Image (cartoon, rainbow, N blue to C red):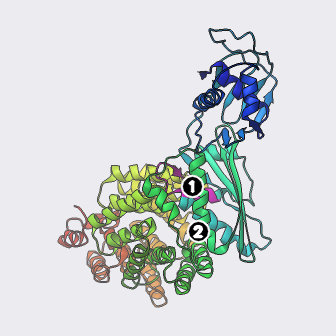
Amino acid sequence: MKVKLQEQPFQVLAALVERPGEVVSREELQKRLWPEGTFVDFERGLNKAINRVREALEDDAENPRFIETLPQRGYRFLAPVETATAEIAVEPAPQPAPSLPRRRGVLALAGGLAATLAVPGYYLLRTPVRRIESIAVLPLENLSDDPTQEYFSDGMTDELIGELAHIRSLRVVSRTSVMQYKKGGRRKSLPEIARELNVDAILEGTVLQSGGKVRITAQLIRAQDDRHLWSEKYERNLTEVLALQSEVAREVAREIQVTLTPQEAESLKRKRVAAPESYQALLRGNFFLYRGIPGIQKSIDLFREAIRLDPLHAEAHAGLAQALCFAGIFGFRPPIELFPAAQTAALKALELDDSNAAAHNVLAEVKKDYAWDFAGAVKEYHRAIELNPSHLLSHWWYAECLSRMKRYDEALAESARALTLDPVAPGSLVLRSMLLHRAHHFDESIRTSQQALELDANAVNALWWQGLSYAAKRDFPAAIACFTRALAINDVPVFRSLLGYAYALAGEKAKALGTLERLSAMAKQRYVSPVDFAVVHAGLGDANAAFQWMEKAYQTRATRVQEISSIYFDGFRGDPRYDDLRKRVGLPA
């Protein structure tokens, strides 16, 4: 792109880029622009020339990227400058300037700018630079020799992602996708990572915790040309870490020229100092929560410890709410023990910080899965996404809610948004596979599950929806293979139930009955949802037993009672008990 630049502004730019990083005094610029003996208002003329250069560079005097003003001293060019060997042909301005010295060589300026000094021209050649609207925070590298400190570096990464996600105009890639690039495996180049994640910029850095101090380095790289835009080093007390994360987020926002709304600016400032021991317990709790089913109980214990150490720690209450909600979804204990506790924790988190998106998301899930209040759930999901458009779990759970309401097009659109936040991890593909299955797009569901399994062969829930879609297509051997593989990965009641269902549909009644016996034995050791028994009986065509178990699920408010609308029970749709139960749990016809 060619930008017209008049003679004096051009000479100011030339003087500054010849000495990048150095202070060029106003007196030096005056001598360069006006020969000795010239009578002119130097101050006003120089100010005008500087302003025109800034206009050409789209620079801001208050938050400069290129030209910094040093009061009473002069100006400094901030961006790196490289001397190129090629020359750029420029079109001279209409009026000549014979008195100006000719200079040869091309200067390429950071930010996609190129200024030629080959002729006394008046044009600045500038390559258009795409605005930064998306970012990925790569896992911060743990500089400690202690591998047990990984929870801290991972936690700091999560917190930075969360802080940047408060900027609603910025798409922030989820931690599930960025953790794929954690050092230890084959490290890809930053441009390659940016292409895979489809982001405009990458934030990377290191963290070291030692003796109550935290040292962090961070640097921002623009994906378009792999250019460093900003870097900084910080050292803080552990008590100041929350404020530090907000500071980094504000610095990034300033560098990429994002205009913060008053609410966003306030959110990035409003950081209560948490007790250091409580903050450490919070990070450990998140670390175990992200490990999935094996880590949920440990995360609950750690979040409770964080709350004990600091009862006013909003993030700890929100973390506990999420962990209890996951425990309810995965059937750790009866829902009546878990969902009310999750709701209490979420409400406490919002009492302390009403902008906590995770807490709103938990309230939505409790309303959907426990209170069967879809309208209330939708309202809370909307609030969570409004507060944090990059909160992946809110998009997942909202899409699932829409599918329960048979609003499949909206659900798939929501899952598409989730995929932009989670492009290289299996989770959002598993979600989409589930939605496609519920919409009866079975072939697409099978293909989408396979994509998830190609990213992670142990993505066990992908086998759930792939197997059910095979069962819907009456490919029972394929369904049995999926559920057998899932059970080998994770021996939990739901996958044993699904295998029993597939056996029953395949006519292998003895194996289906054997599954019921196994579920009964498991129920003596741990919680087994009544829905798991109902699913096997449905496969066997035993309507009375299936509805007895589903009624028990209703009475105990079992999380999965809404699966009455799933394909397991399609054969009973003409039974009055089907519509009665469907209405009681708030599902559409």
Q: Which sits in the foreground, 517 or 70?
A: 70
> How would you rate the neighbour count of disc 1 (Cα within 10 Å): few for under 14, some for 14-19, many for 20 or more?
many
Q: Which amino acid type is marked by label 2?
A: Leu
Rendering quarter of residue 331: bottom left
Query: Magenta residues, as a range?
Result: 164-179
Q: Is residue 466 visible?
A: no
Residue depicted at x 40% and y 52%: 414
Relative to 173, is 162 above or below? below
Which residue was labeled with disc 2?
A: 242
Is residue 361 on the magenta stretch?
no
Q: Which sits in the foreground, 520 or 148?
A: 148
Is residue 177 on the magenta stretch?
yes
Relative to 103, is 113 above or below? below
- Residue 258 position in % (x across, y down): 52, 46
Q: Is residue 42 left or right of residue 103?
A: left
Relative to 48, is 303 above or below? below
- Residue 1 position in % (x across, y down): 60, 23
Residue depicted at x 54% and y 72%: 487
Rendering quarter of residue 234: bottom right
- Residue 5 position in % (x across, y down): 62, 21
Q: Which amino acid type is marked by label 1?
A: Arg
- Which mark is first along the chain, 2 or 1? 2
Q: Secondary structure at mark 2?
A: helix
Rendering quarter of residue 548: bottom left
Measure how far apart labels 1 and 2 are at the Cα level.
Answer: 13 Å
> How would you rate the neighbour count of disc 2 (Cα within 10 Å): few for under 14, some for 14-19, many for 20 or more?
many
The label shown at residue 250 is 1
Q: Which sits in the foreground, 57 or 216?
A: 57
